[in-house]
Amino acid sequence: MRPYYVEFVRGGETEPQIVRYRVGSIGSAFEKCLREFSEAKLIKGWIEGSYKDGHGITVYAPPSRARIVAEPALDEEQTAFEFFFSCREEPAVNRGISLRTNKTCRMQPTK
């Protein structure tokens, strides 16, 4: 677990704030920030550390918070097209062992 820093602005404020989280990844730090401050607008995140060449900072862009609105499912009438096969099931005659189902399929004429 390493310290990650998240910079954000609370809803209605103009002054950015910085919070430090000890988590396993930057994604977890962004998630913790959004749970703690649900109205926050994320600006960036970063981690500081020692590397082979000395001290360094890795900056991360915030994840997208776009929400996708689910649309209602299409009705059966809206998904049926003229070129689909229409199948009807007719019970087969009992041949002593088991009943089978015969399917008769035919192409619908196009208009």
Image (tube, helix red, strand yellow):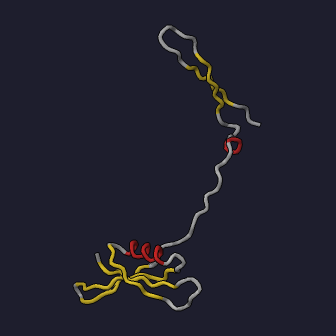
Residue pushed farthest right? 111
Q: Quadrant of the C terminus?
A: top right
Q: How many numbered discs? A: 0
Question: Residue at the location (59% across, 17% down)?
Answer: 91
Question: Residue at the location (56% across, 20% down)?
Answer: 101
Q: Position of residue 82 (x, y in %)?
A: 71, 37
77 is higher (above) or lower (below) than 34: above
Q: Position of residue 5 (x, y in %)?
A: 38, 83
Relative horizontal placement of residue 109, taking residue 2 as reference (left or right): right
Question: Residue at the location (33% across, 78% down)?
Answer: 22
7 is higher (above) or lower (below) than 34: below
Q: Looking at the image, which is closer to me, 105 or 92?
A: 92
Rendered image quadrant of residue 55: bottom left
Residue pushed farthest front? 36
Rendered image quadrant of residue 28: bottom left
Q: Position of residue 38 (x, y in %)?
A: 52, 75
15 is higher (above) or lower (below) than 62: below
Question: Residue at the location (53% across, 80% down)?
Answer: 41
Q: Quadrant of the N terminus?
A: bottom left
Relative horizontal placement of residue 23, taking residue 30 as reference (left or right): left
Relative horizontal placement of residue 111, taking residue 21 as reference (left or right): right
